[in-house]
Image (tube, grey):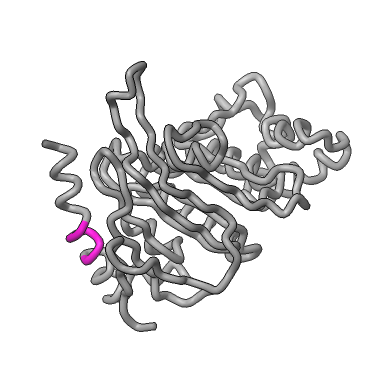
Amino acid sequence: MNSLRRTDISAAMPLVAEAPAKIEVRGVRKRYDANGNVEALAGVDLKVRSGEFVCLVGPSGCGKSTVLRMIAGLHRPSEGEVLVHASGTRAVPTAMVFQSYNVFPWKTIQANVRFGLEMTGMSGAEADRRATAWLGKMGLADFANAYPPALSGGMLQRVAIARAMAVEPEILLMDEPFAALDAQHRRILQDELLTLWQEDRRSVVFVTHSLEEALLLGDRVVVMSARPGRIIAEFEVPFARPRAPEIRGEPMFAKLEQEIWNLLREQVGKHAA
C-alpha cells in the first residue's frame, strides 16, 4: 500500500487484517453527573483485532481516555457494551500505562515492577526473575534498588511500562504515556516502544494527541470528534512492519500527518469554542 486509506464512519469499517476481534466496543454512550446531563460519548463502535496496534486521537475532552478505561473495566458505559475476548491463558488479560507514572514512592524500582506480578499470585523467585528481565529490557538494571524520587520522568515511565509488560497481558492499554516528557525523551521512548511491540505484537490501544506518534506506532489511527465523542474516521497506516523510526523523515509520513490534521482541525476548533 502506498497511500493512506481513510474510512469515514458513514462507509464500511476497514479491515486492517483478517484476525479475530480482541476488543469490541458496541454502541457505547457515557453520561456523567447525577441526572446524566453531561454526555461524554455518543455511540462509539470500535473493533480491535488480535495483534493490532490502534491509536485513538481527538480533541481534549472527547472521551478517548474514557473509552480506554472502559476496556480496562475501570468505567462502565451508560449504554452499549464493551467486550474483551481474552483467551484465558494469561493471568492478566489487560494492563494499563497512564500519563502519570503511578509508581509507589516507598517501594524500590524492583519492587514496583514486581507489584503486579505479586497480585497474580506468582512466586517471589519467579516475580524477581521476570522483574529483573524487564528492568534490563528498559535500561533500568542499574536502578533496581533505587527509589522513584531519584529517577527522572523518562525513567519513571520506563518503570511503568516494565510493570505493565512484566505481567504479559494479552492487551496493553496506554493513556498518553509520553505526554509529560520532554521532546527528546518522548522520541526515545516512542522508538523503544516500537521495538518492544514488534517483538511480540500484542494488542494495543494507545491514546495520544500526537499525530506523529500515532503514525509511527499504529496500524490504524482512529479519529474522534469533539464532545460528545464519536468516531468520525479511521485511517490505515501504510508503512510495513517491522517499522523503523526513520519513517518520520519520509515525505509520505508528513503527507499523512497533514491529511489527518485537516480532518481533526475542525473538531479541535469545536472543543475550543
Image check: 166 left or right of 38? right
User: What secondary structure predominates along the stretch shown in magenta?
Assistant: helix
Q: Specify the farthest residue to the left.
A: 273
The total number of labels drawn is 0
Rendered residue at 26%/48% (across/down): 225
Q: Is residue 226 left or right of residue 81?
A: left
The image quadrant that residue 121 belongs to is top right
Could you say where residue 109 lies in the image, as x and y percent from the top left?
67, 32
Residue 72 lies in the magenta stretch? no
Image quarter where the C terminus lies is top left
Q: Position of residue 163 (x, y in %)?
A: 65, 40
Picture quadrant where residue 250 is located: bottom left
Residue drawn at x 37%, y 60% as measured from the top left: 221
Residue 99 % position (x, y): 45, 36
Question: In the figure, 259 relative to 89: above or below?
Answer: below
Q: Is residue 50 above or below residue 1?
A: above
Is residue 181 in view from this perspective?
Answer: no
User: Horizontally, is 137 left or right of 265 in the view?
Assistant: right
Examine the image and state in which quarter residue 151 appears. top right
- Magenta residues span 259-263
* Residue 175 rendering spot, x and y as whole percentages: 45, 41
The foreground one among 185 and 251 is 251
Towards the viewer: 86 or 240:
86
Name the image quarter holding the N terminus: bottom left
Q: Is residue 137 left or right of residue 154?
A: right
Residue furthest to the bottom: 2
Q: Residue at x 22, y 58 (%)?
A: 261
Q: Nearer the viewer, residue 180 or 21?
A: 21
221 up-or-down from 266: above or below: below
Check if residue 261 falls in the magenta segment.
Answer: yes
Residue shown at the point (30%, 32%) measured from the top left: 39
